[in-house]
Amino acid sequence: MKRNIEPDISQRIEAARVLCIAAMMFVHVRHYEPAAGLAAASAVGFDLLENFLRDGVSRASVGPLSMISGFLLWATLAKGAKLPDLIQRRFFSIYVPMIIWALITLAVYTPISMFIAPTFLDRGLAETTNPVLYLLNTVFFITQAPEGATVHLAFLRDIFMCVVISPLLLKLIRVAPILLFTVLVALLILKINSIIVLRPLILLSFAIGLFLAEKRVNLSAADRYLPLWAALFAASSMLIIGWDKGVFPKAMHELTFAAGPMSFDIKTSVLAPLVRLTGSLLIWTAVARLAGSAWIMQLRPVTFLAYCSHVLALTVIYYAIWRPLVAGPEDAFYPVWFLMAPAVSFAVAMALFTVLKRISPTLAAMLSGNRLEPSAGRAGSLKRDTGQA
């Protein structure tokens, strides 16, 4: 059962983590219409680029991260790790930091809602019939992931739950893989959510990672088809952008289905999964060219910290610094802000890394899930990070 992770695959995993988390940040940058002074051609060109990065690259990054988590979990279990011990470690390295960052976010937004201006909390509380459950979901994501400044943290909740149910997934992979993946694909296409794993895509991708490890699939086999994956991803991304721009006939938009917990529509049931599938293949094959890069190794220790803090960091910097001091009320430089958002987020994470390590190693460990410790080498870092986002 034991499978050692090849050095080139280890490096690729590290590169994929950094790039996927950087890409996921685009979807969390708030959208603003370009200022009236921006040339029409430039506005249209940026609009297409923004949609491509948001609905294409950014959303496609969830799949590879989840697959990597499943693959590494299998590798750790194969080395003899006990599942109860592993779940306990993941609780403190994934779930506890999620809660802390959600509480920090609420601590920032609550006084703003009370004394300065409406925030996502005002909107969410106004729309819910159960404010207590809404606030609990904003922090713990018990039954759903409310839209707002903590929604990205729900990814960590789902990854942790995938770790918890991994024995069942592994059992089904070994005895009934076709049945398992038929069910998981159906959950994704029909948008059937559960309180076990809120997003079907994460559950499916995690299970694929387990399957690839269990069946000892050659993870470099798809590399030679990189141009094909790039073409398919670009085409599928253009399809979903065209859908949003009204290119497709109205009849196709009206082709929907809903019954109980199930629902179906062309965009989210067909086009979005297609983007994520082709994007996952493209990302995995493309990062082979970046594996082992010096800048990847520099960013790797703060990747988790950057993911947890990026929404809050970008919001504070945008409203406190960028808009009043640089962009002005019309936000004429929004395209620049949008494109530099991942770099800003990692810069903030690096600053946090430096400060926290000096003033409070304990706090640093809590906020980062104990990921700011010096690496013991690639194999050691992968072993420590198995199953983490």
Image (spheres, rainbow, N blue to C red):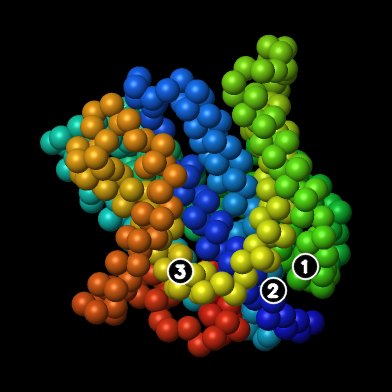
What whole-number distance in Å separates the C-alpha atoms at marks 3 and 1? 24 Å
Q: Position of residue 131 (x, y in %)?
A: 33, 36
Lower sequence index among marks 2 and 1 = 2
Q: What residue is shown with label 2?
A: 9
Q: Which of the 4 image quarters holds residue 360?
A: bottom left
Q: Position of residue 388 (x, y in %)?
A: 54, 67
Q: Position of residue 362 (x, y in %)?
A: 29, 78
Residue 200 at least partly seen: yes
Residue at 46% across / 49% down in the picture?
Answer: 25
**The furthest residue to the top:** 250
Q: Which of the 4 image quarters holds residue 31?
A: top left
Q: Amino acid at mark 2?
A: Ile
Say whether marks 2 and 1 touch (CB < 8 Å): yes
Residue at 58% across / 78% down in the picture?
Answer: 382
Q: Amino acid at mark 3?
A: Leu
Say whether marks 3 and 1 touch (CB < 8 Å): no
Lower sequence index among marks 2 and 3 = 2
What whole-number distance in Å separates the C-alpha atoms at marks 2 and 3? 18 Å
| SS category of the residue bearing label 3 | helix
| SS category of the residue bearing label 1 | loop
Q: What residue is shown with label 3?
A: 299
Circle number at residue 219: 1
Q: Amino acid at mark 1?
A: Leu
Left or right, 14 with respect to 254, comes to left
Quarter of the image with the N terminus is bottom right
